[in-house]
Amino acid sequence: MPGLADEKYISFTTFKKDGTAKPLPTWVVGLDDGTLGFYTSSASWKAKRLVNNPKVVLQPSDARGKLKAGTTPVTGTAVVVTGAALDEITAKVKAKYGFMTKITKLLNTLGHIGKGKFPYGDRGVKITLDA
């Protein structure tokens, strides 16, 4: 079975302060140090929840977050990153997803018109899987 880094989408579950699971589909890439990563907005709820609880659950999914049959969840720890770590994630996401990165940035911009600033891809998330 391919690793999570080979998946097009994963369900990335973070947890609210009260322990409620909040799964969201996201892209994922493998990083040079063996961790996984993706980029997000510093204004996103997933980035905000990771500050309070770095424990996450990942599982292969489709673009809407429907879990792939026959797969099992994997736990890990995630941290929000900037700088060189974000640069590595951004480069790998652009290499793997290509033109879709431009489309999602445009859709993000259009979707937030009149709602105030919502940065796109200004934070990275690095995930270390549990052994």
Image (cartoon, helix red, strand yellow):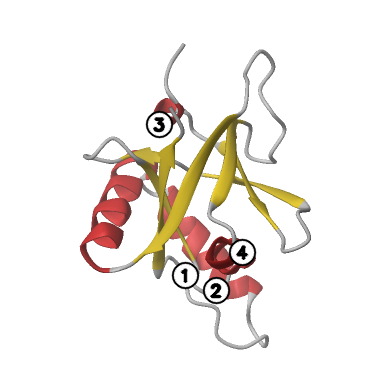
Classify 10 Å Cα crowding around label 2: few (below 14), some (14-19), many (20 and above): some
Residue 70 appears at what percent x and percent y? Answer: 66, 13
Q: Nearer the viewer, mark 3 or mark 2?
A: 3
Cα gap from disc 4 to disc 1, whole angstroms: 17 Å
Q: Please tell me whether mark 1 sits on a helix, a strand or a loop.
A: loop
Q: Which residue is mark 3?
A: 5
Q: Quadrant of residue 65?
A: top right
Which mark is on residue 49?
A: 4
Q: Nearer the viewer, residue 5 or 113?
A: 5
Above or below residue 21? Residue 9 is above
Amino acid on which the number 1 mark rests in the picture: Tyr
Classify 10 Å Cα crowding around label 1: few (below 14), some (14-19), many (20 and above): some
The answer to whether the residues at label 2 and label 1 have Cβ atoms under 8 Å apart is: yes
Point 39% across, 47% down: residue: 37
Q: Please tell me whether mark 3 sits on a helix, a strand or a loop.
A: helix
Residue 131 appears at what percent x and percent y? Answer: 43, 27
Amino acid on which the number 4 mark rests in the picture: Arg
Above or below residue 74? Residue 96 is below
Which mark is on residue 109?
A: 2
Classify 10 Å Cα crowding around label 4: few (below 14), some (14-19), many (20 and above): some
Q: Is residue 97 left or right of residue 111?
A: left
Point 41% across, 26% down: residue: 6
Residue 45 appears at what percent x and percent y? Answer: 63, 66
Q: Quadrant of residue 85?
A: bottom left
Upstream in the sequence, badge 3 or badge 2?
3
The answer to whether the residues at label 1 and label 3 have Cβ atoms under 8 Å apart is: no
Above or below residue 16? Residue 63 is above
Q: Which residue is mark 1?
A: 120
